[in-house]
Image: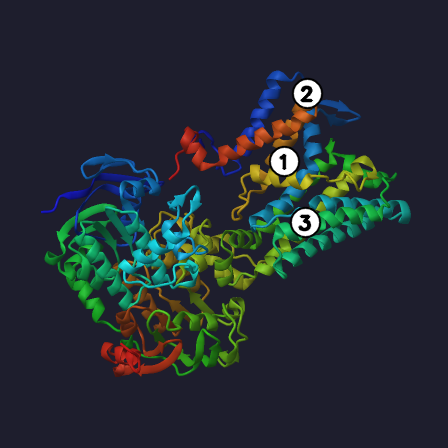
């Protein structure tokens, strides 16, 4: 057995009102990829933040190579050899790729930064990861996937012993994930210990040597990946019986019949230059239309055009036969459209406001500022959705910024449900959300369409699209390339349509 | 810290605490600081004086609080005060207008000036600091043009009452501040405007995605701050029965911003504390008064003011508090 590289014993951390970690042990060995699994609020992020010096722990000890360490800042942790790449890329978008890789440790000669050394070093560092880009360009000019690779390259260049990857794959497409995994394997062979967090089970099993499961801030167990079946893993994570999970995943949305034939949404020739080529689609009452495609295929761009976040160059949108003048979310909401954005932090939460205020926001905005929803009604709404969506919080007055990602997502879903839209656009509603909450959100989608709401469902997880759509519209390279109906909705058909004429 | 206090505290608690400390200092070291005497049936004394003198800053700070909560700032409040003072003086001396007409014209003008700021910020997307700098510079010029650069004195008992009259035995300006505090609280908390203001300040993009009309919110806060500055301008002008375009409201924008920050509203926007801003204004004024009654040269006030502001801001900083063990620990 490989020796323990990073050893955390009885780590305890509490926040006001919540015990986030309760005497959790975690051991990372040199040359292994170790996945940390758990539902939202299980304590994964908190444990990572304690290990990397973001949070001060309340109790317990951390040893690195048998030396007791007490990192107080991420920078100190980095100095000790623990580097982290977070879910949201934490680099400077307005600096060049090379500057980002060398930020804070620029090679200097007589006080002058040696740009040639930086550019060559950065190019080499990225080439090691099989990434070939112009390192003098701004980081923001590259896709999130490339930005992530840059973050990893930076961590590797710092000569980390421990690399923490917190959901690095959530915005990567298949090829990029494969690329990332080959890099991870290479680093592992060099003796690095990698702590990996992901919500994709396939990826966990593909890459992990060992899995540690947390639930409600407690350690459930540590297992070699080969000895833990998927069903065992999921039941450990959510604390439910295996049979329950199996039964629920058999169910598809197509068991719910479409009630009426009136189109809620009709989109004709919606176009935006260098963003989306003409899109035509309609959604009926009680129908879920899936929008499938790879990263960058134009799914989100289409949704944003319909909701009015961006202005189209051509095309028309109708809601129940009434024309919707595009270019304003406010007008879209007035006509009964809701949009759950994939970018929770930027376009979703109002971090310092309470759960209650976040829930009533869209409804209140629609009513106007003069007609305030009475406090008791607000409380009622908040309590109802906290219960219905199982939002984990002591009360509705907690700032939403203090909730875990999955619970934030549920609050945002509640915001749109409270505004009672006719059409709800869900853009990656399950991204960064744990297995249990995912199933809950899918269940909510089923209920909503049974109530007659029209839903446009965007997800990178093909299985979800397959399970939860009456029809699937497929996009590729910013074009609408196909549509699948009824029995055509199979993973084989979907992959064929996405790949048709392409180079995959 | 919280457990020591029976009431539900907020970020304004540090401003109140500073105020109490300054008053305690005076209780011990300044003889007769708290003595209040009755003259002509009205109350006089240092404490009353502090409240009276802080009135213009408190009035402006109410409007400034809302602007800062949206993530903006208004540098033109002092200039608006000067313009309104000049208009009032001209209406009295040239038109012999009655008080209601003066009030309507002055407050309407002040609101329009605020709307001008709001238009630049919300529709033309000019950065607030630049947008209001325009009126800050040009406004004082306009005020001087209106008065031909002269100090216009006037005799109008009804207008003077606004600045130095007494109601319920205390200066009318204090009543006015309380009325405006109540009015502002009602306007923001009994409607959804307060929620929208905090939402826009906390995350403008998410607010837009939720359907909040950011333009209306911005127009509202700048117009409201203009209105508050108009009242402050009337109080300041009426107090001296003279419109002094060069000096009325001079540097008052800085005191108002300071009052808001001391009061616990963050300059980055979000949650606002109306009562905190009033405490903030009182901290500034009671310091000034204390220094003057201690017989120190006026020059010291600026230094002591700066030190106090530094202290309050450090107390508000969670990093500072956890490092030096003040109050509760934060995550």
Does the residue at mark 2 contact the one at mark 3 (Cβ under 8 Å)?
Answer: no
Taking the image as shown, residue A262 lies to the left or right of residue A68, namely: right
> Could you tell me which secondary element the residue under label 1 belongs to?
helix
Q: Give the Cα distance between marks 2 and 3.
A: 34 Å
Crowding around mark 3 (Cα neighbors within 10 Å: few <14, some 14 to 19, many 20+) is some
Nearest to N terminus: mark 3 or mark 1: 3
User: Which numbered mark, 2 or 3, is in the foreground of this view?
Assistant: 3
Whole-percent x, y for residue B243 in the image = 82, 41
Figure quadrant of residue A413: bottom left
Q: Give the Cα distance between marks 3 and 1.
A: 22 Å
Q: In this view, does B298 lie above or below A83?
A: above
Q: Which residue is nearer to you in this view: B293 or A31?
A: A31
Q: How many labels does the image show?
A: 3
User: Which numbered mark, 2 or 1, is in the foreground of this view?
Assistant: 2
Whole-percent x, y for residue A462 in the image = 28, 71
Question: Which label sits on residue B146?
Answer: none
Figure quadrant of residue A237: bottom left
Q: Mark 1 points at which residue?
A: B281
Question: Which label sits on residue B133?
Answer: 3
Crowding around mark 1 (Cα neighbors within 10 Å: few <14, some 14 to 19, many 20+) is many
Kindly give the residue lying farthest to the front in the view shown. Answer: A110
Q: Is residue A454 above or below residue B178?
A: below
Crowding around mark 2 (Cα neighbors within 10 Å: few <14, some 14 to 19, many 20+) is few
């Amino acid at each position: 057995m490989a020796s323990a590289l990073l050893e955390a014993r009885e780590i305890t951390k509490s926040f006001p009102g919540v015990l986030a970690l309760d005497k959790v042990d975690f051991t990372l060995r040199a040359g292994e990829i170790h996945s940390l699994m758990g539902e939202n609020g299980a304590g994964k992020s908190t444990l990572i933040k304690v290990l990397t010096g973001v949070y001060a722990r309340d109790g317990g000890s951390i040893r690195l190579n048998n030396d007791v360490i007490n990192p107080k800042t991420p920078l100190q942790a980095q100095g000790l050899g623990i580097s982290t790449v977070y879910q949201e890329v934490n680099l400077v978008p307005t600096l060049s790729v090379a500057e980002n890789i060398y930020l804070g440790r620029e090679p200097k000669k007589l006080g002058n930064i040696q740009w040639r050394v930086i550019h060559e070093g950065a190019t080499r560092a990225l080439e090691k990861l099989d990434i070939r880009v112009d390192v003098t360009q701004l980081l923001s000019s590259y896709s999130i996937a490339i930005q992530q690779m840059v973050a990893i390259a930076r961590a590797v260049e710092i000569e980390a012993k421990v690399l923490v990857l917190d959901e690095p794959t959530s915005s990567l497409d298949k090829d990029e994930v494969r690329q990332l995994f080959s890099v991870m394997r290479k680093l592992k062979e060099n003796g690095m210990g990698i702590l990996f967090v992901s919500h994709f089970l396939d990826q966990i099993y593909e890459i992990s040597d060992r899995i540690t499961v947390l639930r409600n801030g407690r350690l459930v167990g540590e297992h070699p990946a080969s000895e833990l079946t998927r069903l065992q893993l999921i039941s450990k994570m959510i604390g439910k019986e295996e049979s329950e999970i199996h039964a629920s995943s058999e169910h598809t949305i197509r068991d719910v019949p479409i009630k009426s034939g009136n189109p809620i949404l009709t989109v004709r020739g919606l176009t935006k230059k260098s963003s989306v080529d003409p899109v035509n689609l309609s959604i009926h009452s009680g129908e879920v239309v899936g929008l499938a495609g790879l990263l960058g295929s134009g799914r989100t761009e289409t949704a944003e055009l319909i909701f009015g976040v961006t202005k189209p160059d051509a095309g028309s949108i109708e809601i129940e036969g009434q024309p919707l003048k595009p270019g304003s979310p406010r007008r879209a909401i007035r006509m009964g459209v809701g949009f759950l954005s994939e970018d929770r932090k930027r376009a979703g939460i109002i971090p310092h406001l309470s759960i209650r205020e976040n829930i009533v926001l869209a409804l209140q905005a629609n009513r106007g500022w003069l007609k305030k929803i009475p406090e008791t009604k607000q409380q009622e709404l908040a309590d109802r959705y906290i219960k219905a969506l199982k939002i984990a919080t002591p009360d509705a007055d907690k700032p939403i910024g203090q909730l875990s990602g999955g619970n934030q997502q549920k609050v945002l879903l509640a915001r749109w449900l409270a505004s009672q839209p006719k059409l709800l656009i869900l853009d990656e509603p399950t991204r960064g959300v744990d297995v249990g909450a995912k199933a809950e959100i899918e269940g909510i989608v089923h209920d909503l369409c049974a109530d007659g709401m029209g839903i446009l469902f965007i997800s990178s997880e093909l299985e979800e699209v397959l399970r939860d759509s009456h029809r699937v519209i497929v996009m590729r390279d910013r074009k609408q390339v196909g549509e699948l109906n009824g029995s055509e909705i199979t993973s084989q058909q979907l992959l064929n349509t996405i790949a048709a004429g392409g180079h995959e | 810290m919280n457990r020591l206090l029976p009431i539900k505290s907020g970020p304004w608690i540090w401003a109140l605490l500073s105020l109490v400390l300054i008053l305690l200092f005076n209780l011990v070291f300044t003889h007769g600081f708290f003595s209040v005497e009755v003259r002509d049936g009205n109350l006089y004394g240092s404490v009353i004086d502090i409240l009276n003198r802080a009135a213009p800053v408190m009035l402006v700070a109410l409007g400034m609080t809302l602007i800062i909560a949206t993530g903006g700032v208004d540098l033109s409040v002092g200039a608006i005060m000067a313009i309104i003072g000049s208009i009032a003086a001209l209406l009295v001396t040239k038109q012999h207008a009655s008080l209601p007409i003066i009030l309507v014209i002055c407050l309407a003008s002040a609101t329009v000036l605020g709307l001008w700021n709001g238009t630049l910020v919300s529709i033309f997307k000019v950065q607030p600091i630049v947008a209001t700098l325009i009126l800050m510079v040009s406004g004082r010029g306009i005020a001087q043009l209106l008065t031909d650069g002269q100090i216009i004195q006037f005799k109008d008992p009804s207008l003077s009452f606004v600045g130095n009259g007494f109601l319920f035995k205390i200066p009318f300006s204090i009543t006015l501040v309380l009325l405006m505090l109540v009015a502002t609280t009602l306007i923001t908390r009994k409607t959804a405007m307060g929620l929208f203001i905090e939402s826009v300040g906390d995350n403008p993009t998410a607010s837009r995605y939720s359907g909040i009309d950011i333009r209306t919110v911005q127009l509202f806060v700048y117009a409201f701050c203009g209105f508050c500055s108009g009242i402050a301008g009337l109080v300041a002008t009426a107090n001296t029965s003279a419109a002094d375009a060069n000096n009325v409201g001079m540097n008052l924008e800085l005191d108002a911003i300071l009052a808001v920050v001391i009061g616990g509203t963050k300059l980055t926007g979000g949650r606002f504390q109306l009562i905190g801003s009033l405490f903030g204004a009182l901290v500034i004024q009671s310091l000034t008064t204390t220094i003057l009654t201690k017989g120190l040269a006026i020059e010291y006030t600026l230094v002591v003011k700066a030190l106090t502001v530094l202290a309050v801001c450090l107390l508000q900083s969670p990093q500072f508090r956890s490092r030096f063990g003040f109050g509760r620990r934060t995550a």
